Amino acid sequence: MCMRWFSLIFGIMLLSACSQTEETSKKPEHTLPYVGNYDLVYKKVNGTEVVDTIYPKIPSFSFLNQDSVLITSASLKNKIWIADFFFTSCGTICPGMTNTMKKLNEATKDLSNEVVFLSFSIDPTRDQPSVLKAYMKNYGINSSNWVFLTGDETETHRLGVENFYIHAAEDENAEDGYAHAEAFSIVDREGYVRGVYNMADPNQLQKIELDLRKLLKEEYGISGSK
């Protein structure tokens, strides 16, 4: 099920990347593709009809973190986001996802002022802040730019599927009661999703780091120590 959803998301990404034309004025040459369904807005510029390709942004959100502090999208403004969706009682893909995110977080310590890692729990009823804090301790996570988030379950699932393009839903047929994709998303400073990565593929860890560094360097003029 996870692979089917990831194939669908990858198809959306491919369509988005291929849809750009020389007439597009909203998004000129860019480092990474913009992901998601888009609207076309036609207008006249100096007597010539051009088209703006308008991509969706991540909407405003608010969640509690592992310290019971309210984290909002506004408080994360001007940061690049690396996001995933998980739950602490997951015994299948989540432990591997967390360890992979930890590797990525450690590999990009030189970018800690520019990047924030977001792990959204899709089982907030169980995953209260104290549970998230214990989970972080169990995995040896002590990072200033990685937050674990819990909030309204319906909103979390909608945010994952519709905005971060990571499938997350309650599923009584799934082994742990939830079906979700083993994926990470990159979101730029303006709130646009710029990549969705299937982390079941070990090669994607290097790719997402390279894409992250490329995005920061080429679009924001920021280079890390590597």
Image (cartoon, rainbow, N blue to C red):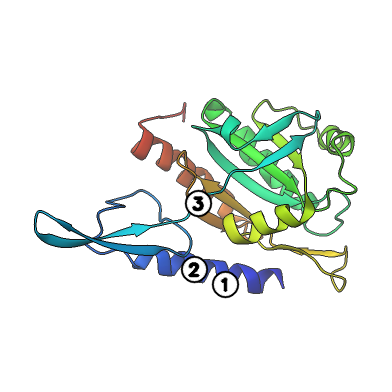
Looking at the image, which is closer to me, 91 or 190? 190
Q: Residues within 10 Å of mark 3 (few under 14, many from 20)?
A: many
Element at badge 1?
Answer: helix
Three-letter code, disc 3: Val
Q: CA distance from mark 2 to mark 3?
A: 12 Å
In this image, 214 relative to 6: left or right? left
Residue 212: horizontal and vertical position, in percent?
A: 48, 42
Residue annotated with mark 1: 8
Residue annotated with mark 2: 12
Q: CA distance from mark 1 to mark 2?
A: 6 Å
Task: Return the disc, 1 or 3, that comes first in the chain's sequence.
Answer: 1
Q: Are marks 1 and 2 in contact (CB under 8 Å)?
A: yes
Q: Are marks 2 and 3 in contact (CB under 8 Å)?
A: no
Q: Is residue 224 above or below residue 18?
A: above
Q: Residue at x 34, y 59 (%)?
A: 53
Q: Is residue 49 above or below residue 123?
A: below
Residue 98: horizontal and vertical position, in percent?
A: 74, 46
Residue 217: horizontal and vertical position, in percent?
A: 38, 35
Q: Residue at x 47, y 26 (%)?
A: 225
In which quarter of the view is residue 190 placed? top left
Q: Residues within 10 Å of mark 1 (few under 14, many from 20)?
A: few
In which quarter of the view is residue 68 placed? top right
Task: Return the disc, 2 or 3, that comes first in the chain's sequence.
Answer: 2
Residue annotated with mark 3: 193
Residue 95: horizontal and vertical position, in percent?
A: 80, 50
In this image, 131 relative to 104: left or right? right
Looking at the image, which is closer to me, 226 or 213? 213
Element at badge 2?
Answer: helix
